[in-house]
Image: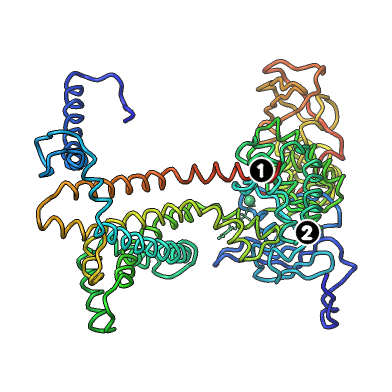
Amino acid sequence: MAHDVEVLSRGARVARALLNGYALAIYLFLFAPIVLLVLFSFNANRYGTFPITGWTLEWYRAAVSDYQVHGAVTTTLKVAAQVTLISAIVGTAAAFPLVRSRLPFREGIRIVLILPIMIPGLLIGVSLLVLFVSTFHWQLSEETAVIGQSVYTTPFVILLVAARLQGFDNALERAAADLGANTFQRLRRVVLPLIFPAILAGALFAFTLSLDEFIITYFLIGANNTLPIYIYTQIKFGITPEVNAVASLLLAGSLTLLAVAFALPQLVRRARRAVMRVTTA
Amino acid sequence: MTTVPPLADADSRPDTAGIDLRGVVKQYGTQAALRGLDLQIRDGEFFCLLGPSGCGKTTTLNLIGGFVAPTEGEIWIQGKRVDQLPPHKRPVNTVFQSYALFPHMSVLENVRFGLKMDRVPRDVSSERAAQALGLVGLEEFGSRMPAQLSGGQQQRVAVARALVKRPAVLLLDEPLGALDLKLRQRLQIELAQIHRDVGTTFVYVTHDQEEAMSMADRIAVMNGGRIEQLGTPEEIYRGPVSRFVADFIGDSNFFEATVEGAVAQLPDGSRVACAGGRSGAATLMVRPEAIVLHGGDGSIAGHVVQTSFLGSYIRIAVETPAAGAPVIVALRDGAAVPALGEGVMLSWTAADGVVLEPGPAA
Ligand SMILES: Nc1ncnc2c1ncn2[C@@H]1O[C@H](COP(=O)(O)OP(=O)(O)O)[C@@H](O)[C@H]1O
Ligand SMILES: [Mg+2]
């Protein structure tokens, strides 16, 4: 934190120290369970809790060779891939009129479009269940879960892409038009390349959200299991160290994806520069 | 080029080369940005639109470029009516004030962009882009990204990118506005050179009168959505048609006067020389460098309230009952400089006393 005043009275110093301690306590409270989970996944103790009796990779081995885990991971990845694709395309397309057109009630439309972020997942799950089953008479499947998850993840893409479009220098599009680019060429050559990092970040976000989405999926996926649902069903029979290992892997995967999402704009820029150097050399 | 269908013949007038704006009005809601503009710009000339902020310069440029549609009136470029054509179908290219270089493309890609849109073969476009970069002295910079260039270099890339398409008209909207004075002066010279090299019509927008004077073949001084005066820099400087133009271009001294023939009577009763042109109540305008410290017939008396050494000349301010504000006199370096508070006599030749419509300060 940038300190606004560098010379402080003793009272202010004490207050600042207390505040820092308080913040530390909150972080501990938030992250200690996660740290413990990872710790236990390497714990030789077969009940997956304290005391720590030794270190082992046994639970990871068990998790990786479990066919139920395999099935759940496959389903999770298939669902996540579809959700990612749908959110990226629908979300990007929706962001454009939101920022660019002179729609009446634009602010209202914006709120409606991003409402699914704020609506409880329970509500999305139940209402879609009613719609799909009682109204359309569909079988619940991976696909219904994909639709349900997309309702929830698409607004994140909309938000990210809209923010990027908001900051987009309109002179660039004018310049492209001035140089002979028609509407399609302007989109393809200038606008999309420049908002691409936001689309990619949104897609990664959607992927991560989909990976561990539970409530909506639980209502809509029918007989299939995604990883979160599999873990949940396992926990019903007691927490095994294997579940700790699976959850830790999920955590590692999500964190990696998030890190990539944040580093992405930089990476894209660097890659582009490298390509440019090769092609113009 | 597409062949012109017979019906369109009435629409093409080859005698009107260059740019022709006829009765152009642009309304934004109830507010008029342009109130009936008639303007002919000749083929190949360096033309400046000059005026204070908000007078409609950018709007005029955007109308020619096709980014803004006129509310009324017609726009012709090289004998072709263009006011219903989108920007990418006009023989016009623009240098934007913010340069608007594509940040995700190298300098060479930026310059080649327009040729790529025209489906010019890659080897040809590479060569023409390199040529255009050479024209602005940046042949070594093709592989750089725009963010790796200085402001002046970015500006030159923007010029190269617009010129590579060999447009009939190049539009420049305050292209040097973001640069510091030294660089601006250097680029002014470069732009004028480029203009001579390529022979394209330049329409250049600026609010800086010195910039306009130093570069333009002709200047249109705009005010409140209208053209107040159009002419060469010298014509406008020597013969401003209004107090607004005189005030905007160069420094000037104004006197309330009653004119009779070639004599103007000032409020304190003194009678001075003027160019005439109208009789009765008028505003008399005299440039600071036209005034000499010389007594005798047709001079006014005052005393010096300030002297400033400005390098190439010395400026003195003289308070006199003949004028409301102190009269500014520019003395060439080396002239005898009066002391502060000293009484002086000011006079000028009849030709230097420009008679304008009466009116208060703008
Ligand atoms: N898009 C717009 N909407 C409303 N008014 C505008 C718009 N563009 C320009 N104007 C108005 O038109 C007038 C002329 O603007 P402009 O051509 O940009 O002036 P200049 O370039 O000489 O500073 C100004 O009063 C400005 O407020
Ligand atoms: Mg402007």
Name which residue type carries label 2: Val
Q: Quadrant of residue A184?
A: bottom right
Image label count:
2
Q: With respect to residue A136, does B159 lie above or below?
A: above
- The numbered dot on residue A215 is none
Q: Residues within 10 Å of mark 1 (few under 14, many from 20)?
A: few
Q: Quadrant of residue B165?
A: bottom right
* Rendered residue at 23%/72% (across/down): A222
B146 displayed left or right of B5: left
- Residue A151: x, y in percent? 32, 67
**Residue B357 visible from this viewpoint:** no
Name which residue type carries label 1: Val
Coloration mode: rainbow
Q: Residues within 10 Å of mark 2 (few under 14, many from 20)?
A: some
Q: Quadrant of residue B139?
A: top right
Mark 1 C-beta closer than 8 Å to ligand 2: no
- Residue B134: x, y in percent? 80, 40
Element type at marker 1? Answer: helix
- The numbered dot on residue B120 is 2
**Residue B135 visible from this viewpoint:** yes
Tell me, yes or no, whether dots 2 and 1 are on the same chain.
no
* Rendered residue at 71%/17% (across/down): B342
Chain letter for the residue marked with disc 1 in the picture? A
Chain letter for the residue marked with disc 2 in the picture? B
Can you name the residue that lies furthest to the right here?
A: B15
Between A257 and B196, the residue placed more toward the observer is A257
Alpha carbons under labels 2 and 1: distance apart = 22 Å
Q: With respect to residue B86, does A164 lie above or below?
A: above
- Residue B51: x, y in percent? 68, 49
Residue named by callout 1: A278
